[in-house]
Image (cartoon, grey):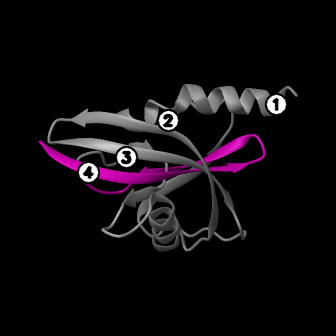
Amino acid sequence: MKHIEVAAAVIRRGNEVFATQRGYGEFKDWWEFPGGKIEPGESPQQALEREIHEELDATIEVGELLQTVEWDYPGFHLTMHCFWCELTGESLHLNEHEAAAWLDKDTLFSVRWLPADEGILKVIEQEINLRSNP
């Protein structure tokens, strides 16, 4: 089975996380955390910085590893390294996605997540709840 390794940015802003809606492919209209494939010679963190710049015209500070998700899609196996991230500027521009949203604890589960991304929502929800209730 084909194996794809990617990095995903869980971008935080206060008690919210940033999500994007895919505008192409088999999973068009599903929601995900932005990021993409790790190129040969890149670390996951370097891939995230590059991908976020390409996809969103934004710069980020990559923080700690949140979780690595292993997921079998019908045509490939996905390894997705998910990192907490912070924007280092205010600008965001959707170059590849249909839509984007800042989601909080009340809206986190309101969108149709890609299956691999859905796997980390409970951990994110716990963190949001900790930040909301110090």
Give the residue at mark 1: 132
Whether residue 91 sits left or right of residue 6 in the image: it is right
- Do callouts 4 and 2 mark residues in contact (Cβ within 8 Å)? no
**Which corner quadrant holds the N terminus?**
top left
- Do callouts 3 and 1 mark residues in contact (Cβ within 8 Å)? no
Snapshot quadrant of residue 117: top left
The amino acid beneath tag 4 is Ile
Q: CA distance from mark 4 to mark 2?
A: 24 Å
Disc 4 packing (10 Å; few <14; some 14–19; many ≥20): few
Give the residue at mark 4: 4
Residue 38 visible in the picture: yes
Q: Who's the residue at 37% across and 46% down the image?
A: 29
Element at badge 4? strand
Return the disc, 4 or 2, that comes first in the chain's sequence.
4
The amino acid beneath tag 1 is Ser
Could you tell me residue 43's position as x and y percent? 44, 63
Give the residue at mark 3: 29
**Which corner quadrant holds the C terminus?**
top right
The amino acid beneath tag 2 is Val
Could you tell me residue 65's position as x and y percent? 56, 45
Could you tell me residue 63's position as x and y percent? 64, 53
Give the residue at mark 2: 111
Q: Who's the residue at 54% across and 30% down the image?
A: 121
- Do callouts 4 and 1 mark residues in contact (Cβ within 8 Å)? no
